[in-house]
Amino acid sequence: MKRSLYYKFIFGYLLFGLLGFLIISTFSSKMTYEHLLKERADLLYDEANQLAAEYSAVYNGRDVSLSQMTAQLSAFSPALQSEIWVVNRNGTVTADSSGGARKGLSVDFDPTAIGNRNYGLGNFYGAFPYDVLSVSAPIAANYRTYGYVLIHMPLSQLSASRDGILNILYITSAIIFALSLIILIVFTQTVYFPLKKITAGANEYASGNLDYHIQLDSQDEMGYLSNTLNYMSDELNRMEEYQRNFIANVSHDFRSPLTSIKGYLEAILDGTIPQEMQEKYLTRVIAETERLNKLTQGLLTLNSLDSKGKLNRTNFDINRVIKDTAASFEVTCMKKDLSFDLTFGDSIQMVHGDLGKIQQVLYNLIDNAIKFSSNSSVIYIQAYPRYEKIFVSVKDTGIGIPKESIKKIWDRFYKSDLSRGKDKSGTGLGLCIVKEIIQSHGENIDVISTEGVGSEFIFSLPRVSP
């Protein structure tokens, strides 16, 4: 692009001008000459017939002075820019517009030589040292032909007229071609220079400089393209930052339990932990191992969602799924004296989605509600229809989420300051997985939370008839 595009455009522009000039100088020149030739030939032919008709009056018995006719030839000649002859049947000039200079000249005049045209081209049987346009009209009377009126116009007159017209055409074309430079200027300003900036930006991005910003303020397609590239670079930059944070978070979350496991095992091996307490610390090792397992499973789940894994959609009763998922937390709830309040809009509410993944969504939301609920409290779960959707709500009366953390809870590995003391075994991936699953279904999930009062998560699923 640095050299080829702009120079190709200029080359095409110059080629257009050259071809335009060649077309004008060849086709237009020929067409103009042929038009003038036919026009002048018709004009001269009409004049020749008029003069021949007046000469015919002499032979029809009318009193017409031949000297007067000769004077008329001399008067017509300058106006027509031609030489006029009157010849007899033998081809001898009997009168001419030059005052008799041609009188007595004999030519082998054959009126049938021009065929079906009313004019002829050439030096008229050697009578002229240059080419002329010749027309003839018969002088006839009493059903006899007594001679002919001949008018000869030099072809140089036609060439001069053609050149004059072409000069006007050339000047007009040159002005138009010069004005068309505006197109080149507009192209340079609106396409070439912006494209150079965009290309420079693309090269910066390719070299890894994602902080580069393309400075282009136009509101056209080039401006839209530059804004799109700027947005892309910002997103890539954020993605790069996100990847760095992601790796740091993964490393931290893996390093903490691994460090604990390593410390406990070393303490058991070197005798720091007495034998009667080894079972307690081995139980902690198992707990840390379970935490690592949950973290690994969460990462695998997110990876499958990021790779746009195909959903296994079926129709199922969301009421039954909620009941079964809540029942799986019976032992956990007993430890904190928690209870569930299940409310359904209908006895059977069929939805369309991936049963296994929706179970995981409910499991993660209920698990969070249990972690952050106070002892002896109630967790409210509702499922109710609205238009073409079924909305599912999981509400707790726990610690709530700070206002500044609402938008961050969907980020991977994020834990609010309030939750860190409660969520000892969490990985920070649960809500991220929930949002990915719901969005993969083409639906939305929202949260309503007040710090110190509780949180409510609401998501939708497409409703189907039972």
Image (spheres, rainbow, N blue to C red):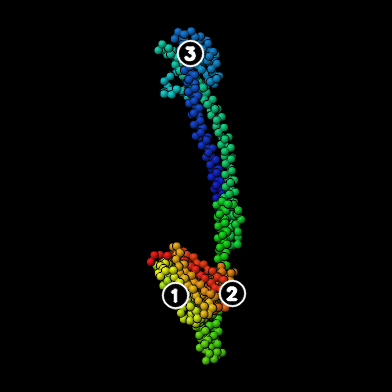
Vertical order, 391 against 255 (above or below): above
Q: Earlier in the sequence, mark 1 or mark 2?
A: 1
Q: Are the residues at dot 1 and dot 2 in contact (C-beta closer than 8 Å)?
A: no
Comparing labels 3 and 2, the label whose residue is closer to the camera? 2
- What is the C-alpha distance between the residues marked 1 and 3? 122 Å
**Residue 104 location (% of width, % of height):** 50, 13
| Residue type of the residue flagged with mark 3 | Glu
- What is the C-alpha distance between the residues marked 1 and 2? 28 Å
Q: Are the residues at dot 1 and dot 3 in contact (C-beta closer than 8 Å)?
A: no
The C terminus lies in quadrant: bottom left
Q: Earlier in the sequence, mark 1 or mark 3?
A: 3
Q: Secondary structure at mark 1?
A: helix
The residue closer to the viewer here, 236 or 326, is 326
Comparing labels 1 and 3, the label whose residue is closer to the camera? 1
**Residue 212 location (% of width, % of height):** 60, 60
- Position of residue 315 in the picture relative to residue 436 (left or right): left
- Pointer 1 residue: 325
The residue closer to the viewer here, 112 or 440, is 440
| Residue type of the residue flagged with mark 1 | Thr
Comparing labels 1 and 2, the label whose residue is closer to the camera? 1
**Residue 255 location (% of width, % of height):** 55, 78
Q: Earlier in the sequence, mark 3 or mark 2?
A: 3
Q: Residue at x 40, y 12 (%)?
A: 143
- Pointer 3 residue: 54
Residue 230 in sight in this render: yes
Vertical order, 414 against 268 (above or below): above
- Pointer 2 residue: 417
Q: Residue at x 44, y 75 (%)?
A: 325
| Residue type of the residue flagged with mark 2 | Asp
